[in-house]
Image (tube, rainbow, N blue to C red):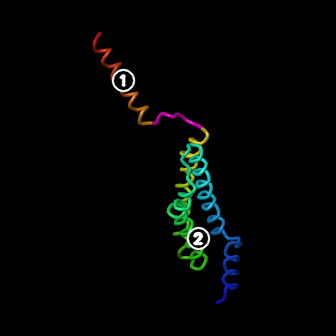
Amino acid sequence: MDLSTIINMLVGFFSSNSTIINGLYVSLGFIITDTIFGYLLAYKEGVFDWSKAPQALATNIAPYMGGLILLAFLSLISSELESVFWVATAGVSVKFGKEIIMEKVKKLFNLGDSVSYENQITELKATIEKLQSDSTVK
């Protein structure tokens, strides 16, 4: 097997019109979007460091992308692995989608309250205790 055969296989793999490849593209889109928003957020907060970017890609991004690409390739070869691919794709998409929406977009665009739910609960408990103690004094 020469290099041109391998390249043709890879081009055929990624230009395939199957639902597996479409699912892979969606998950990879979430991963890439999360990475971009992460870099933008780090830049906004003044902690972005070009020297740490490759390490973040290698440890936080590449394992997810590589695992999904490998599972997609194996799913195209063996239909028994297709359900494993879909579970992994769903998990990765939910994880990165949540991180994009719930964490990075809110911080990047200053959306939502800056007070966490734990702080709100603590404040609410203190208010309830104060009201209870005021009512028992009367």
* In the depicted structure, whether residue 101 falls above or below residue 2: above
Magenta residues span: 110-116
Q: Residue 14's quadrant in the figure?
A: bottom right
Residue labelled with disc 2: 69
Residue 83 place in picture, x, y as percent: 53, 69
Residue visible at 58% across and 37% down? Answer: 111
Residue reaching furthest to the left: 137
Residue visible at 56% across and 73% down? Answer: 70
Local crowd at mark 2 within 10 Å, few (<14), some, or many (≥20)?
A: some
Local crowd at mark 1 within 10 Å, few (<14), some, or many (≥20)?
A: few
Amino acid marked by disc 1: Ile
Amino acid marked by disc 2: Ile
The C terminus sits in image quarter? top left
Q: Is residue 90 left or right of residue 10?
A: left
- Which element carries disc 2, helix, strand or loop? helix
Residue visible at 55% across and 36% down? Answer: 112
